[in-house]
Image: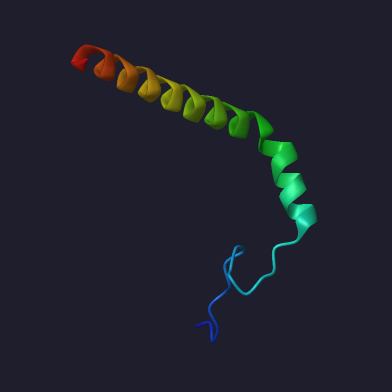
């Protein structure tokens, strides 16, 4: 038996993304999002520190 139509994936682009789904996503994954933000912050601060050290050596 063969399917005449392919099943659509759940996250297809034809679906409109509802704000309720977004808040639900945030509530379920806030710890991961916070973790990623902290890592990004650390990387940015570290790169600034390295840049300042380079400048100080050159002067």
- Percent across and percent down for residue 28 are 71, 38
Q: Which residue is drawn at 55% across and 25% down?
A: 38
Residue pictured at 57% horizontal, 74% vertical: 7
How did the renderer colour the structure?
A: rainbow
Camera-side residue: 6 or 26? 26
Q: In this view, does 57 lie above or below 47?
A: above
Within the image, what quadrant is residue 35 found in? top right
In percent of width and height, residue 14 lies at 62, 75
Q: Where, quadrant-wise, is the C terminus in this rendering?
A: top left
Q: Is residue 54 above or below residue 27?
A: above
Residue 1 appears in the picture as rendered: no
Q: In this rendering, would 48 be left or right of 7?
A: left
- Give the left or right position of residue 5, taking residue 48 as reference: right
Which residue is situated farthest in the right direction here?
A: 20
Residue at image location 47% in from the left, 22% down from the top: 42
> Viewer-proximal residue, 9 or 34?
34
Q: Is residue 53 left or right of residue 17?
A: left
Looking at the picture, how far across and down is residue 36, in whole percent? 53, 31
Residue farthest along the left direction in this orientation: 58
Provide residue 45's location: percent of width, then percent of height: 45, 22
């Amino acid at each position: 038996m063969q399917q005449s139509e392919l099943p659509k994936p759940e996250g297809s682009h034809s679906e409109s993304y509802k704000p309720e789904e977004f808040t639900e996503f945030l509530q379920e994954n806030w710890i991961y999002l916070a973790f990623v933000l902290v890592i990004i912050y650390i990387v940015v601060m570290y790169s600034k520190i390295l840049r300042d050290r380079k400048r100080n050596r050159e002067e």
